[in-house]
Each structure stands twice: as structure tokens, then as C-alpha cells.
Image (tube, rainbow, N blue to C red):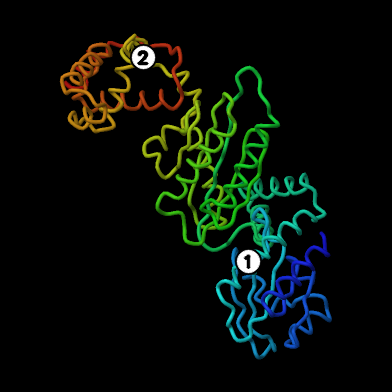
Amino acid sequence: MSVERIQTLVDALAERLGRAVVVDDRDLRLVAVSEDFGITDPARIWSLLHRRTRPEDVRYEEIKRWTGPGYIPENQALELWRRLCVPIRCRGALLGFVWVTDRCGNLTATQIDEASRAAEAMGLALHDGRPATAGQERELNHRLVEHLLGQDPVLRRGAWEEALDRGLLDDVGQVAVLLVSRGPEEGGGAPDNCRAVLSESVERLCRTGPGEAALAAVWPRRATVILARRQGFGDGRLADAAATLLTELTTRSGQAGGWRIGAGGPVRGLDGLPQARRQAEVALSAAGGEGGAACWSQLSSDALLAQLAPRAWEDALLPEGLAALFADPSAAVLIPTLETYLDCAGDAQRTARELCVQSTTLAYRLGRAEQICGLNLREGRDRLLLHLALGLRRLHGTHQLPALPTNVESLSARRRAG
């Protein structure tokens, strides 16, 4: 790190505030110190003599999870005056702490903001000077993410503790998982550019997204992000974050091949992370092959349908009537009409409003679909069959499926009779 740069920032901040300022690294080892303006306490003297701050003096296990400024109260037993603590972070990683003596508690909001801005500048200086290379940092994040989302409880617990110690996650509140994937390029592609766009977009999500703490691992065409938030992810925050990330990736990449994002969770704490990952995987498969974003909590029936492997759909034997419907030239109109009608629970008026068509047009389309597939939309089992088949087709795509030679009309009649 550039000690001279940090010292310059510390001296300038102390001069503006007229107060003693100290900077420690993330392990509470002394980095830089200002003049004390003739006012100091025994705890500060101890720190200067030993070149470190005692963890018990400043509630280290708590402050290393802070994402913004806060106060360490006066402690007469420890001979410690009240201090403002501003965590130094860069790209979500905890790098150190700024300490400002405030014995009387009369720092103004403007002065606290000034200390926070100085901490941001120090974060850039500390980050640029860290001995770890970008490759080492990337390798660390990959390892932590893989262990956190894996099935081995011992590795998961170890990775969790390390992430907490580094200030990357928070053990209070909820956590969520986002999986990002990119489809193949048409006519080749530029994986380096793809990775750069993905890395920058994910980094921005970690800084400005709904999580108060974040840990991300990025590969050339995919990424995994773990978000933590003390107050939870209510009010659609997670779905909004996924949609925002999708928009940025789509806009910035400017290439063929769709981005897909699946969001899992929120869950509470360490033990729920594997479940959140599985939920994100299901949501990712429901996002569609052409690109899109899906959130587990909003999947409804697709949460079950998406868990069926595409191979099972490809090998499915369809009743002859369904195969005929899928192959019919009017399928492009009839299938969306049927799906909307079934999603509206058979409410014809609501369906007509959703499709912006006249009721007579809707009735014609539904009647034509019944005629082609041989199913009766007034029969519960026929409607269930259609709804399932249409949902699987939407999730897993259209294939040349072998048809099961079945007289659908007589089968429906036998069910009604029996």
C-alpha cells in the first residue's frame, strides 16, 4: 500500500476536523496517525506504543461487519474516549478503519460525511496497494463461494467464518443467491469482452444492489453472487435487482446470445445457502433459453415444472391431439391464447382483456384449439393436461416429439363415464 498517500489523507482530514485521526488495517494494525491536538486518552497512547488497537476496546467482531460510520461509546474501565469509526471498504471488501476522537459527541453530520469520503479515498489507496493480485482475489472468491454453496457442512462453516472475518458477508438477517449465465454467441464471440462486462456489472450490483454485503465469483460466461441484508429482501428487492442486472448486461454486451439470471432465496443464514442455490438454479432454468430473469419466490407453478429435466420433456410421449396442436400452422396464435385462458382460470372476460381481443374472437380461437387437439376445456383433467404441456413447452422449448397414438376424444369420454 502507499503509506505516504494514506498519511497525507489522514493529516488532511485531521486538519479539517481539528481532531485526532488514526487509520488501522482490517486486522487493527496501525497504518497512519495524525497529531493529537494536545488531547488524547490512555487507549490511544497504548495503540501508538504497540502499533495496534486492542479488539476488545472497539468491539471488533461487530465493527468488521459495519458498512457505514458508527460510534464506539466511551468506556471508563478501558480508559477509552468516544470514537467515530468509519470502515474502509473497496468493492465490498473490508480493508481497514478510520478512527476520529469525539469525546463530547459533537461531530456534525457534515464532518461525519467528510470522514466517510476520506475513508473511500483511503479504500482505493489500500486496494491498489494490496499485495494480493487480481487473480489471487478472484481465486479466493471462487473458493469461498463454492464452499458456501456446497454440501459439505465443515467446508461451508469454514468459508462462512472467513467471509465474515473479511467483512464480505453479514451473519445477521437474510441471504440470497443470484446465478448469471450467458448463452452461446452466434458466429463465435468475444469471451474476454463478455467477462469484462459481466465482472463490471456484477461489481456494480455488489456496490449498489439490495445487499448490504456481497460476495461474488465471476467466470467468463457465468457468475454467482451471494447477497446479505440485515432487513431482509422484502418488497420485490431481489427481483428488481435481477431485472436491473439483466438490463445492464443486455445493454452493455451488445452481442447475440441471451443473458439469463436466476434468483434464489431469501433464506436465513448459513444453513439456508445450499437451498437458495438450488432455488436459483431452478429459477435460472425458468428464465428461458433466449434470456430473461426469474426469481424463485415468483415462479408459482413453474417452480415445479422447471425442476423436470429438459431431457424428460424431449422424450415425453404426447397424446396425439397435443402433437397436432403444436404442429398446426395456427399454433402461434392459439397457444398463447390457450395459455392466457388457463392462467386466468378459465375466465373468458379477463382473458379477452389480457389479450385485447373481442369475446367472439376469443371464443373462436378456443373452439378451434379444442377442435384440433380433441380436448374439452370444460373438463378439469383436459385443462390440466393442456396447462402442464404448455408450461413445459414454454420452459423447455419445442421439439419434434413422438406422439402417443391415443384417441383423445374417446379417452375423455371414458374418463367422464367412469
Point out residue 220 in the picture as x, y percentages from the top left corner: 67, 34
| Chain-order first, disc 2 or disc 1 | 1
Disc number for residue 326? 2
359 left or right, relative to 37: left
**Tag nearer the camera, 2 or 1:** 1
360 left or right, relative to 338: left
From the viewer's side, name the closer residue of 66 and 217. 66
Q: Which residue is drawn at 60% across and 44% down?
A: 202
**Secondary-structure class at tag 2:** helix
Point out residue 248 in the picture as x, y percentages from the top left corner: 54, 38
Q: Residue at x 73, y 86 (%)?
A: 40
206 left or right, relative to 343: right
Neighbourhood count class around disc 2 (C-alpha, 10 Å): few under 14, some 14–19, many 20 upward:
many
Q: Quadrant of the N terminus?
A: bottom right
Q: Residue at x 45, y 45 (%)?
A: 240
Q: Residue at x 67, y 72 (%)?
A: 60
Q: In which quarter of the image is residue 52?
A: bottom right
Disc number for residue 255? none
Depicted 308 relative to depicted 72: above or below: above
From the viewer's side, name the closer residue of 284 and 213. 213
**Secondary-structure class at tag 1:** helix
Point out residue 296 in the picture as x, y percentages from the top left corner: 45, 42
Q: In which quarter of the image is the C terminus?
A: top left
**Label 1: which residue?**
116
